[in-house]
Image (spheres, coloured by chain):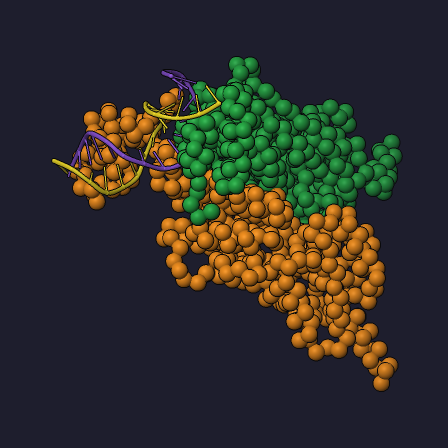
Chain colours: A orange, B green, C purple, D yellow
Amino acid sequence: MTKKVSIKDIAKELELSITTVSFVINGKSEEMGISEATSNKVLELIKKRDYSPNNAARLLRTGKSNTIGLIVEDLGNYFFGNIAKVVELEASKRGYNVFLSSTDNNPNTAKALIRKMRNSSVDGMIITPTKELNQELEDLKNDKIPFVLLDRTVPGLSANAVVLDNFKGAFDLTVHLLNNGYQKIGFVSIHSDMSQMIERERGYFDAMESSNKSCTKELVLKVKFDDSAACIISSIMSFVRDNPDMEALFFATNYLGVHGIEALKQVGKSMPDDLAVVCFDDNDLFRLFTPSITVSSQPIKQIAVETIELLLRLVENGIKHESPINKVLEPELIERQSSIQKPLWEIEQTLKKSFNKI
Amino acid sequence: MTKKVSIKDIAKELELSITTVSFVINGKSEEMGISEATSNKVLELIKKRDYSPNNAARLLRTGKSNTIGLIVEDLGNYFFGNIAKVVELEASKRGYNVFLSSTDNNPNTAKALIRKMRNSSVDGMIITPTKELNQELEDLKNDKIPFVLLDRTVPGLSANAVVLDNFKGAFDLTVHLLNNGYQKIGFVSIHSDMSQMIERERGYFDAMESSNKSCTKELVLKVKFDDSAACIISSIMSFVRDNPDMEALFFATNYLGVHGIEALKQVGKSMPDDLAVVCFDDNDLFRLFTPSITVSSQPIKQIAVETIELLLRLVENGIKHESPINKVLEPELIERQSSIQKPLWEIEQTLKKSFNKI
DNA sequence: CTGAAAGCGCTTACAG
DNA sequence: CTGAAAGCGCTTACAG
């Protein structure tokens, strides 16, 4: 394997023209009317010499790189790490390589990545958008470079996307709390105009409003995405202290949930007795917490598979001038212990108070 | 940006030869004695036209792809996901792309990946080896393709590697348990002849032997890497039931720890009262468990940075005929609640028993 | 059925 | 100081 064999070597050894060999390699034997005997000879020698075509030369000639770009928010996080794994696996099955990168939600990083991937002539890209990306994505569309948005859409941009039904996830989670007897529910989220966060917030508010219980109370805390962990934790601690009548906490993202649980530990509140807890987006270990954490879980594998399949369809069939495709997948409510039905004694107490009023 | 500009376009617009433009682009103006005026004109137009050289053409001509391959065990796991993130970031800073893949510890997958990356002409690779990879890695060496092993070495192969001091990590963890009063310590690991697992086991046994307490007892459970989660959990449950006098459990990997904790929940043993627990390799959330889990933690960022730096040094300076470089990094013992000093009452009981004997 | 040749966009001896 | 030209390894009209 010291020196890579080229198509020329194969042709020479077989005393055929390069053209013929190339046709066989690209499965055009039949179409080009190459005899089966010739074809088989070529195939055999290719295997014997362990020949594989030079991707760079091919790309230079055809413009097809058989590489796609995958831009996620944070490879180190459970959701995106597993998305990346599945995307890579599926792409690999179909003969594609994948370039992988994290934006950490920084628009400048995202812009640079898109630029870099374009320069690397990827055949298409999967993009977890940050904000301020409208121009770059419009350029991609104009230049007919296929891409699929992952996890969230971009306001004002019509593009292919695979997302979760964030509204439903948040709505169900809130209703679950209400049904289990929690009425004063705090919603902890980040300041963001990205679609998935807006939808989750809307789900929370809609569920709260649709509950006709009068003592329901909406309480919202928003932190900044790039605040430090310590800062987020202390914000949540204050939020909890400032709202002593709060009965439950809804964390709008996985990492907020993690910080939130840490905050509750620090203020000495226990779940679910002092405060019930639910979280959007599961984490590998939430099921092992004490108590285990109720979540709205994303079908990670399905998201990844749908996304890569959609992208490769666009790559291989070209972009039709249809309107963009939007896949919306269903989250799953996983009820665990952190939000079990409000203990009976509490209900009794409430009843007593009502009695006293009468 | 509809049509990509080429070096020819730039040359034509400036009425220069392609050669001159190429020299400027590659920073050889000075060396080749190109006037500063010309040089600046070129640089300006390049910026204006947003020109960037075609990587494929460059690779075809020079053989340098500015791409490295990263092969990990499992992108979806906390350790490797974060390794990948940092490697990608550092590589990016230095102008390299990275191809990323998971082996799931399957030798055939690993072989196919190495092959694929070679065909993609990567400049070098970072490889988390599986077993049976000796031939492929020897080939890489013979063909002077730089690579660095990550996380573990391969028996019988002398190669560049960045690994953890697994022996020390396991030794310290065991000593920590012994010091805190636990003597019958069970070691849960996988059947594996990979270096990191062997070292961890050696660390455990050495620590146990060096303890001169007579009632110290060694207990070992090994499961298969590709056993299902359910299967591993039930093995651990049996192990715990069959050894009622066991006082502590040492999990040799992160995911074994996770399964182990689940198993303990199921048999109704509580940590650390019934069984103390320590785990090799931290997990993002172990600190938030009840009780929090004592671990030997790997310096993920440092591992990633050292690895990519070593690889790029090899890629850029060529492989010297020195002996391979082996970086061994230090794990950190993080003492948490799952292994706190054996409760006083237990010690008292032991004392009483001793008294009775007298 | 098969071959000679152009050309993808670069880099780099070679020549002035 | 600068240019004409070869060649990296492919694919694909075009010609027989």
Q: In this rendering, does residue B112 appear at all?
A: no
* Rendered residue at 69%/52% (across/down): A225
Residue B176, image x, y percentages: 76, 32
Q: Quadrant of the C terminus of chain B?
A: top right
Q: Quadrant of residue B9?
A: top left
Residue A57 relative to residue A74: left or right: left
Q: In this rendering, does residue B48 appear at all?
A: yes
Residue B345, image x, y percentages: 85, 42
* Rendered residue at 63%/63% (across/down): A198
Q: Pick out the residue farthest to the bottom.
A: A358
Name the foreground residue: B70 vs B318. B318
How many numbered badges does the structure rendering display? 0
In this rendering, the answer to whether B251 lies above or below A277 is above
* Rendered residue at 79%/70% (across/down): A346
Q: Quadrant of residue B72?
A: top right
Residue B159, image x, y percentages: 54, 21
* Rendered residue at 73%/23% (across/down): B210
In this rendering, the answer to whether B264 lies above or below B193 is below
Residue A3, image x, y percentages: 37, 22
Name the foreground residue: A235 vs B137. A235
Name the foreground residue: B104 vs A19. A19
